[in-house]
Image (cartoon, rainbow, N blue to C red):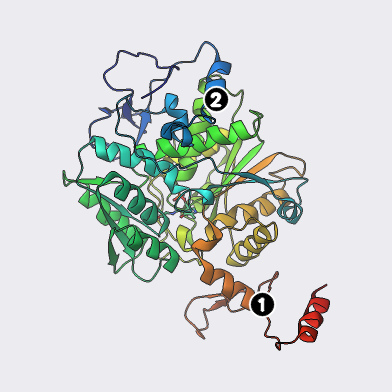
Amino acid sequence: MPGNAARADKKKAEPGIQRCVNGACGATYGLRERVYLCSRCGETLEIDCGLARPRNPESLRREWAARTSSRSALDASGVWRFRDLLPFKNNAPIVTLREGNTPLFDAPRSAKYCGLAGLRLKHQGYNPTGSFKDTGMATAVTQAAISGARTAVCASTGNTAASLAAYAARAGMQAAILLPHGQVSSSKLAQSLDYGALVLEIEGNFDACMRLVQELGDDPSIYVANSINPFRIEGQKTVAFEMMEQCGWRVPDHVVVPGGNMGNSTALGKGFQELLDLGLIRRVPKLSVIQAEGAAPLARMFAALSPRQRADFDHLPQKLEAVENPQTLATAIKIGAPVSWKKALRSVLRSGGQIISVSEQEIADAKAMIGRDSIGCEPASATTVAGIKKLVAAGHIGRKDDVVAVLTGHALKDPDYMIRYHEGTLSLGAKDEPAELKLAGAFRNAPQRVAATKAAILSSLERQR
Ligand code: F0G
């Protein structure tokens, strides 16, 4: 499957290895071995594709660009178009739904809101199931098919579920989905049902679902499709490649992403690092991750790191203190114990970026601002614009810096949140309890009831002008 580029050893049986991220352990596994955590030390794994610097990076860029005008299903995919840098053989049973190829929008109102001269938003919500998960699911489900799994399973706050349901259906494989009961938007739940997945609503939160999935992974018939699986990261890293193409290979100063289970930040960090190692870019952008205040274990750890610890990214803290009972209306990132925290932290520290958290009000208003830019996104994605505003105010991002934020999910993933924001009824916590947090919509736009007459409508128009 890989094209002409850059394999260190083309005769190798498998195009790469899986390696424990714990440098002191150094355990490696073949690509066919179904392991998610290192059997020696329990750390997560990452794939080393064994890529060597191409003699002519420009020819690789040209080939990727040329594939955009090809009619083949592989080339039409914004993931498989970059197959030269993916760990699959030529004859792999590729699964694709034309993922990737997502737009990079200018967002002038959001830029102004953040105090920036300009801001671009890379919208992964334009993927086939409406979220960034599809790029990683294309590779993960392909690997599940290679490994002969009968069932692909995932824990999810909704988007991974919808994506796995779609890709497993395409591959003719059973999908089993563990969702925290009552904590997933109905749009996402509806998608999983429609794609024919077995949906299991668990009495517990996402972290409990994630623990169960890891237990299920011991069964040889079951393949874990969460981002703990390094094959997910491989597909998701292609977003960095596509973004660089869209930026004309001029590296932005900052790339900003939301943080939940930390697969996305891990993947972008890996993507940029590989481009650097291959000589396709000269530096990596500063990668910053934004969490919701009530579900921000990594932002909390980051804030407590000394400057020396921040510089020593080869010796990361061993343990992340989980948030026991995470709370946020951005349900996609309502996660207290992210599995890929170490890989993400290493990427952020290596790039010189930040990990911070933002409040519910900040997320809600940033989301409305992204809507005013005629772009829109789901709440979790809006942490980026809220976070950028804060990072500009704190001087971590310069007003004239070149900034790209990654929007992870489509606006229609959570219409209920939008309606409640605009009607002014958005709140977090039990209704009428003292702890209830009521959110004011700074950019409220409630529907108006008008009489069925031309005069009434004209008078409404006049009032809004
Ligand atoms: N944004 C959206 C819309 C998401 O659905 C998620 C994660 C994230 C951001 C965070 O990305 O986990 O890679 O750091 N959703 C997962 C799910 C947990 O199950 O759909 P991350």
Q: Residue furthest bottom?
A: 451
443 with respect to 126 (left or right):
right
Disc 1, SS: loop
Crowd rating for badge 1 (residues with CA inside 10 Å; few <14, some 14–19, many 20+): few
Q: Is residue 457 above or below residue 305?
A: below
Crowd rating for badge 2 (residues with CA inside 10 Å; few <14, some 14–19, many 20+): few
Name the residue rendered at 36%, 57% in the picture: 156
Percent across and percent down for residue 234 are 41, 35
Residue 442 appears in which quarter of the rendering?
A: bottom right
For badge 1, the amino acid type reads Ala
In the image, 126 versus 442, the foreground residue is 126
For badge 2, the amino acid type reads Ala
Residue 428 in view here: yes
Disc 2, SS: helix
Quadrant of the drawing holding the C terminus: bottom right
Q: Which mark is residue 66?
A: 2
Q: Is residue 437 above or below residue 88?
A: below
Circle 1 is placed at which residue position? Answer: 446
Q: Residue furthest top?
A: 55
33 with respect to 426 (left or right):
left
Residue 312 in view here: no
Percent across and percent down for residue 264 are 47, 44
Name the residue rendered at 38%, 56% in the picture: 162
